[in-house]
Image (cartoon, helix red, strand yellow):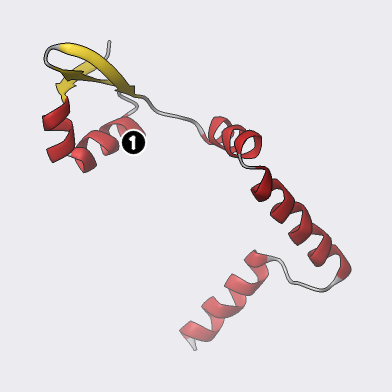
Amino acid sequence: MAKSVTASNARSGFAETLNRVAYGGERVVLKKHGKAVAAVVPIDEQALEDYVLSTLPDVVDALHAADVDVASGAARPADEVFAELDEEHRA
């Protein structure tokens, strides 16, 4: 069952509302003047990735170009660079 909150309460406590949805898996219905007007619902990683890839073609193009650069040796994988930076930071 979804919990409902007023739009003004959701606005003033947005971080709390978002955390309850994202980390607690709750569904929150937002009401304005007693009427349900919107809902905040959790989204899993796969659904988020599917959404981004289907709605932002520039992101898909950039990811493909990055994969080509890594495969050709023109760029290094991000996890490799981050690991190197982490090692340098610890030294």
Compared with 6, 46 (above or below) is: below
- x and y percentages locating residue 53 in the rendered image: 65, 38
- Residue occupying the point 77% across, 52% down: 64
Compared with 66, 23 (above or below) is: above
Q: Label 1: few (<14), some or many (≥20) within 10 Å?
A: few
In the displayed structure image, the side of residue 91 where residue 7 appears, left or right: left
Compared with 54, 75 (above or below) is: below
- Residue occupying the point 65% across, 66% down: 78
The residue type indicated by label 1 comes to Tyr
Quarter location, residue 11: top left
Task: Give the residue pinned by disc 1.
Answer: 23
Count the numbered circles shown: 1
In the displayed structure image, the side of residue 73 where residue 87 appears, left or right: left
- Residue occupying the point 16% across, 19% down: 32
- Asked whether the viewer can see residue 27, the reply is no
- x and y percentages locating residue 10 in the rendered image: 17, 32
User: Mark 1: which secondary structure?
Assistant: helix
The N terminus sits in image quarter: top left
- x and y percentages locating residue 31 in the rendered image: 18, 18
- Residue occupying the point 18% across, 11% down: 35
